[in-house]
Amino acid sequence: MINLEKTKEHLEARLIELTEKASEIDQALRDPGSADWEEHATESEGDEVLEDMGKAVVDEITQINTALQRIEIGTYGECTRCGETIDEKRLKALPFTANCLDCAREAEA
Ligand SMILES: [Zn+2]
């Protein structure tokens, strides 16, 4: 049986971390940066990398928020696709996951 309190704490801590990261990325994107950035093509490539990172962070924030809601309403640990209980090992490795391994594989395929 998964410890919901602990999972919740873990998710909330991760959420704070990610929120900080998101605002750092956001600032880095806004910041014209260390002088003459306009002259450097590499700088805009750097921005693209930052934007991708930003997207990944926002995605994870969304997933964590959903997981926290699921803890609240008592559906945490159930696969949103097939309704099966998600393997505990999987939940420990990916606490914000909403799908069991089989469904995650299907979604990726
Ligand atoms: Zn499933």
Image (tube, rainbow, N blue to C red):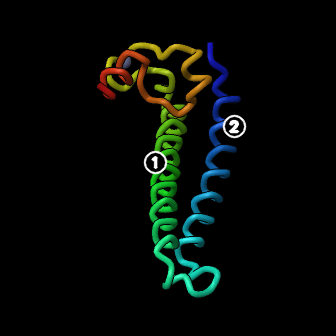
Mark pair 1, 2: CA separation: 19 Å
Locate the C terminus and report the quarter of the image it occupies: top left
Q: Is residue 53 left or right of residue 103?
A: right
Q: Which residue is located at x 67 percent, y 51 percent?
A: 17
Judged from the image, the secondary structure of the residue bearing numbered disc 2 is helix
- Three-letter code for the amino acid on which mark 1 is drawn: Asp
Q: Which residue is located at x 50 percent, y 22 percent?
A: 77
Q: Determine the image quadrant of residue 21.
A: bottom right
Task: Tell me where residue 102 appears, x and y as whole percent.
Answer: 37, 15
Task: Tell me where residue 79 appears, x and y as whole percent.
Answer: 40, 21
The residue furthest bottom is: 36
Q: Is residue 95 left or right of residue 9?
A: left
Task: Tell me where residue 23 appears, x and y as whole percent.
Answer: 60, 65
Q: Determine the image quadrant of residue 9.
A: top right
Give the numbered dot on residue 9: 2
Locate the N terminus and report the quarter of the image it occupies: top right
For marks 1 and 2, the one nearer the N-term is 2
Work out whether residue 84 or residue 54 is closer to the camera in this orientation and state it: 54
- Per the image, the residue denoted by label 1 is 59
Task: Tell me where residue 14 appears, x and y as whole percent.
Answer: 65, 44
Work out whether residue 36 or residue 13 is closer to the camera in this orientation and state it: 36
Give the numbered dot on residue 87: none
Q: For disc 2, does the CB lie below 8 Å from ligand 1?
A: no
Judged from the image, the secondary structure of the residue bearing numbered disc 1 is helix
- Three-letter code for the amino acid on which mark 2 is drawn: Glu
Ligand 1: give its quadrant: top left
Report if residue 83 is visible in the image.
no
Above or below — where is 27 with respect to 15? below
Q: Which residue is located at x 64 percent, y 35 percent?
A: 8
Q: Is residue 46 left or right of residue 104?
A: right
Work out whether residue 98 or residue 47 is closer to the camera in this orientation and state it: 47
